Amino acid sequence: MKEFLSWDQTLFKDSELFELDHIPEYFHHRDAQLQSLMYCIRPALGGGRPVNSLCIGSPGTGKTTAVLKVFEEIEKHSQNVVPVLVNCQVNSTKYAVFSQIFKKIIGYAPPATGASFKKIFSEVAKYIVEHEKVLLVALDDMNYLFYENEVDGILYSLLRAHETHPGARMGVIAILSDTGVPHLLDPKVESVFLPEEIKFPQYTFDEIRDILSNRIRQGFFPDVIGESVLETIAHHTFSLGDLRVGIDLLKRSGLNAEKRASKTIAQEDVESAYEKSRLVHLSYMMRTLKKEEKILLGLIADSPQSNSGDLYKKFHGKTTLGYTRFYELLNKLGSVKLIDADFTGKGARGRSRVVKLRFKPEEVKIRL
Ligand SMILES: Nc1ncnc2c1ncn2[C@@H]1O[C@H](COP(=O)(O)OP(=O)(O)O)[C@@H](O)[C@H]1O
Ligand SMILES: [Mg+2]
């Protein structure tokens, strides 16, 4: 048996499994969430209005995948429900969101200019009523609709469609990245939305190891990764709490091993891959930050290990925001694992905290 890979050999049996937008066949550890989603959608299968839902959890906890899995089932088994998943990061205005819905229902995109929102909306509603369909819209990464202040208008149009277009049945699955700060809706919208909350907790270490080992079994040839290397990958993934990191690590470590013409992945392949894979989480998180959060993170990047009291002075000087808000933002940056902010409980300033950046300052700064 040859010890090295030849130029036309590969470790990857199916590299598609290591792409982040791949919808995995093996999707365990989310049974409760899938069941809750089905419970909300069930009325629609019988022609009624679905119960609205709110899927909430930190990045890489399987929210988008869970909704897509449920949509696959609906498309297989139901004629009358039309599920549409809208990526709100890309489609962050009312017009863009409804253009996506229009495209799914009517089959082609509405003109980019010239058509009014009202026209597009009314075409969608008319189609739904005439064909006796139920529209189920998943607003993925709905956080982005808050930044553009579009969220209330979009939810309001969807949820009160039956008033303007009698017989139009629509429901919403809101998918929100949990960032530690509450996202508030207009009370008028809240009163018609009333979602069933579906929580996506972070995966445990054992769940992460199980999910990754199944990807390995399906995506790599046998014996490419040993137990201890898998442990390392699971450990890195768990430390950032984002499954995306683990999947990206598998791909990059595999490529690193191939570069060395090795038939197996070694710890060194994982360690050098981690330098890049950890940035997958950083980039994703930083895209969801608001202006004040970016300012605070920028100040932390300027002095990566600072005292919370000093940090507050600088932050206040720059934004005039008060301590409560500062404290909330600090907790948020901690909860999304961009910084460590531990209570020291000691020191001249009383309950001051040492704030540490979890990434290199340059890595953060180029993304601000
Ligand atoms: N339970 C699971 N089993 C297998 N793969 C999963 C599971 N949960 C998440 N993934 C994978 O992890 C990545 C991130 O999941 P995703 O659904 O996009 O997370 P979120 O929408 O919560 O940020 C995707 O590539 C997905 O295939
Ligand atoms: Mg997602």
Image: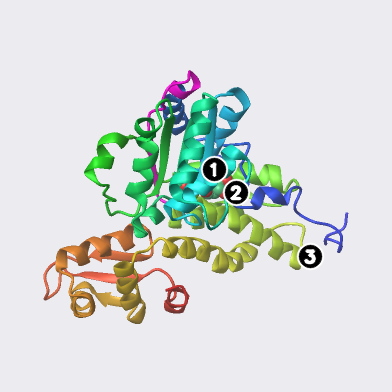
Q: Nearer the viewer, mark 3 or mark 1?
A: 1
Residue 100, image x, y percentages: 54, 47
Image quadrant holding the N terminus, namely bottom right
Q: Which residue is mark 2?
A: 109
Task: Tell me if mark 3 has few (under 14), some (14-19) or many (20+) residues whose alpha carbon lies within 10 angstroms of its own.
Answer: some
Q: Which color scheme does this rendered protein use?
A: rainbow
Where residue 252 appears, as percent x and y from the top left, is 65, 61
Report which quarter residue 314 is drawn in.
Answer: bottom left
Whole-percent x, y for residue 154 in the image? 38, 46
In this picture, residue 158 sits left or right of residue 350: right
Q: Say above or below: 196 vs 141.
A: above
Would residue 44 be counted in the magenta stretch? Answer: yes
- Check disc 1 and report the residue beneath it: 102
Which amino acid, by three-letter code, is at mark 1?
A: Phe
**Callout 2 amino acid:** Ala
On whether ligand 2 comes within 8 Å of the CB at mark 1, the answer is no
Determine which residue is flagged by label 3: 261
Viewer-proximal residue among 19 and 5: 19
- Disc 1 element: helix
For label 3, being within 8 Å of ligand 1 is answered: no
Asked if marks 1 and 2 touch (Cβ < 8 Å), the reply is yes
Which residue is drawn at the image coordinates 49% and 53% (left, top)?
96
In the image, 341 versus 326, the foreground residue is: 326
What quarter of the picture does the C terminus occupy? Answer: bottom left
Question: Which quadrant of the view contains residue 209?
Answer: top right
The quadrant in which residue 257 appears is bottom right
| Label 2: element kind | loop
For the residues marked 2 and 3, what is the alpha-carbon distance in whole angstroms? 47 Å
Q: In this orientation, does residue 60 appear?
A: no
Read off the magenta span: 43-61
Q: Earlier in the sequence, mark 3 or mark 1?
A: 1
Q: Residues within 10 Å of mark 2 (few under 14, many from 20)?
A: few
